[in-house]
Amino acid sequence: MYKVYGDYRSGNCYKIKLMLELLGLEYQWVEVDILKGETQSEAFLAKNPNGKIPVLELDDGTCLWESNAILNFLADGTDFLPSEPRLRTQVLQWQFFEQYSHEPYVAVARFIQLYQGMPAERLTEYQECHVRGYKAFKVMEQQLTRTPYLVGEHYSIADITLYAYTHVAHEGGFDLSAYPAIRAWLARVASQPGHVAMLG
């Protein structure tokens, strides 16, 4: 049985939870409180020397980290990760986009507002996150006006990757009312068989 070390409210951790649920795999969830510094303990750093969640521990004690890398491991050989090289590369393309152009702004704005309660010293950073976060949403909107999912006609881990923080973007002060294709996509993702909510 897999063991997941994570925080239920974390979008990066939610990616792993959602993937495991969609695949119908059994797992044990170990809650980790990042605000209490639990990711910096000696025991946790032995599992991930980078001191971040999520971590997926395999039966043999091997630990995998970085949410999108874990998604690729879990989805390998399933319909959630295309085998055709061009499509598989497009999945990776969106995952890299998420880590460099989406998550650093959408997730950070959410952390500042939801976890930290909008401290005054981070207000400028929060506003900058909004500028760049909306730029990322425009990129997604363009794609989703052409195809129902980020990689063509089929739901994949590209969608799981970007759904995680997009569906809770309002918790970081983002308004998606001007992005109808994204909102329709969010509904399609949530209607998938086996889908579970972040706190479900």
Image (cartoon, rainbow, N blue to C red):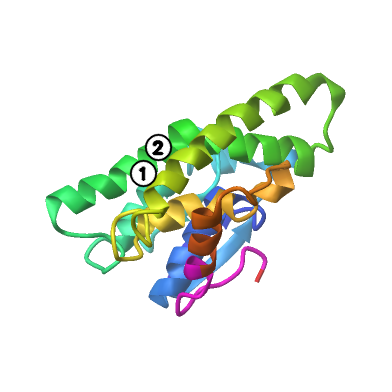
For the residues labelled 1 and 2, say whether their Cβ atoms are less than 8 Å apart.
yes
At which x and y percent is residue 98? 45, 40
What's the mark number on residue 145?
none
The vertical placement of 171 against 108, above or below, is below
Give x and y (percent) for residue 160.
Answer: 44, 58
Q: Secondary structure at mark 2?
A: helix
Q: Is residue 195 visible?
A: yes
Mark 1 → mark 2, Cα distance in angstroms: 5 Å
Decide: is 111 above or below 9. above
Main secondary-structure element of the magenta-colored stretch: loop
Q: Is residue 195 located in the magenta-colored stretch of the structure? A: yes
Q: Is residue 23 magenta?
A: no
Q: Residue 25: x and y, percent?
A: 42, 74
Which sits in the foreground, 12 or 102? 102
Residue 62 in sight in this render = no
Which residue type carries mark 2?
Phe
Q: Residue at x 82, y 19 (%)?
A: 121
Look at the image and give the residue range highlighted in magenta.
188-199
The residue located at (27%, 60%) in the rendering is: 81
How many other residues sit within 10 Å of disc 1, few (<14), some (14-19) or many (≥20)?
Answer: many
Q: Is residue 197 left or right of residue 15?
A: right
- Quarter holding the C terminus is bottom right
Residue carrying label 2: 97
**Tag shown at residue 94:** 1
